[in-house]
Image (cartoon, grey):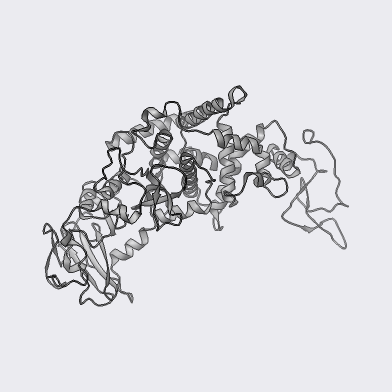
Amino acid sequence: MSERCSAAETLDSLTLTLLESSGEEEGDLPDCGLESSNDQGSETDNQTEFDQDYEDTDGEDSEDQDPGEGTYESKNGEIAWTATAPIQTPGRAPAERVMKRTPGPTRFACSHVDNIRSAFELFFSLETQETLIDMTNLEGKRVYGVSWKEVDWVDFQAYFGLLLLAGVYRSHNEATMSLWNADTGRAIFRATMSMRAFEIMTRVIRFDNRDTRPAYWRDDKLAAIRKIWDKWVEHLPLMYNPGREVTVDECLVPFRGRCSFKQYMPSKPARYGIKIWAACDSKTSYAYNMQIYTGKPADGQREKNLGMRVVLDMSAGLQGHTITCDNYFTSYALGQELLKRKLGMLGTVRKNKPELPSALVTTRGREKFSSVFAFTSTHTLVSYCPKIHKNVLLMSTVHKEATVSTGEKRKPDIILDYNKTKGGVDSLDQMVAAYTCKRKSNRWPMVVFSNMLDVSALNAFVLWSEINPAWNAGKKFRRRIFLEELGKALVSPQIQRRKSVPRGAASLMMLNRIRQPSLENIPCTSTVTSPNKRKRCHACTSNRKKTSTVCGKCREYICKEHSVTITCCHKCK
């Protein structure tokens, strides 16, 4: 406990140091400006106000400039684009491409990760643990009165471990009674705690004091989980430095219950849920920063330039990186703001943006696989035609030349780089959904907290894999192995201190196996059973029999005739 307290105190001091160095004040996340609505409709709030004449000009007979001319004027007449790239002075690389931190786990993470469980618990500080324990015990006393038995962090570890194991076994939607069934369930669930204890923990787990919640509920829609969420988000950038490419996009946590900021996004598989803005490392999908979208603010007015504000919030603390985003966020003004922070920008652009020249928006007279470039002193714009009468626009502050690949489709390097780095958040969403621990619940704070557990487990896997690259090297499903070992490591302290013994034979065997320090202390006359394998008895000379019984000391397979078994209780054994 003392080691955990010292690590948490060191982590809290590191948090304050990082906040002071970045020049940002610690506070509540800003509210966003959308209600539950179609995602396509909400994206229009991010666009800069412009005249209707600046809409998409594909197929219109307007006075467009030909792509071959030397200068293009933007639709709003404020930006002059040129057809030739500006001359770059040789010398040092641009300031926005110079990184200050080495990508990978931080020195704090490397010094505090001793095992798989410690990598996971790095994201839950001592303050977060105390809040969970205090608020849950407070709710337990309110519901069960004097009969409530207070829980501690070991109980929470066991509860989290069972949730993660249910996700690993693809049983997060399976009924609780089925998981604890003696015949069809998993033995580790019955060995850890009773089904009633698990259901009670699910019933009373809380993240704030419901008695004081109405005082600040009107001003903060995340009041039920704000303290836990903010502290958890603060710890994400302290453990890992992302690589040069960082992806900013949106996630959707599936939820169909009652929630004032629930969103409808038909492009997502779940369609209904809680939208979360996320910034991830493009290579490892490590979640560097996250922010929950809470819809319209209290005054009811929609927020202008929402996409720009989200990218600037998500990239806080970064320097020298390239931010990859889609057409919901990308704009000329965003590129300028990121350059002031020594960051690059790469992303697709909507055709109705007023800063675009009409010559690159139109597809009239364009050949298939043709590319047209336009430049300013800071931005590069490309219009690529993958098909006849169809083009895609990308904007970058990183690329300075009109470079095109030599492949059959002659794609520009801007598109190739975008395709390599655009999937960071999508990969995070996919990996979290594969082994999610989220169980059915009508409480949106519990759904958000389940997502926090999933993301913490994924980030812990990234840390553990980079700190120990030889761990299960070459094996498939390394993340599944990691999650299973993490779940077992979390439930082990609870199993070791459990007083009541489970009645099932398989659960009792697992409990004894975890409580035993080593198989070396088991007498040679005892035997253990290997349920997954059957091999020939090594003592049989002829007609060797197949058996699943293994000698407890030499680990050789032995049949019933050549083994000596002593019957004793688990305490004497």
**Percent position (x, y) of residue 542?**
88, 62
Determine which quarter of the picture holds residue 413: bottom left
Q: Residue furthest top?
A: 146
Question: Is residue 49 left or right of 114 when viewed as pictured?
Answer: left
Considering only vertical position in the picture, is 356 above or below 340? below
Residue shown at 58% from the left, 39% from the top: 490
562 or 300: nearer the viewer = 300
Considering only vertical position in the picture, is 118 above or below 41? above
Q: Is residue 323 visible?
A: no
Residue shown at 22% from the left, 63% from the top: 381
Considering only vertical position in the picture, is 180 above or below 389? above
**Percent position (x, y) of residue 16?**
35, 32
433 or 515: nearer the viewer = 433
Residue shown at 45% from the left, 26% from the top: 211
Q: Quadrant of the C terminus?
A: top right
Question: Is residue 290 left or right of 444 when viewed as pictured?
Answer: left
Considering only vertical position in the picture, is 132 above or below 400? above
423 or 282: nearer the viewer = 423
Question: Is residue 174 left or right of 434 when viewed as pictured?
Answer: right
Q: Is residue 456 visible?
A: yes
**Percent position (x, y) of residue 107?**
41, 40
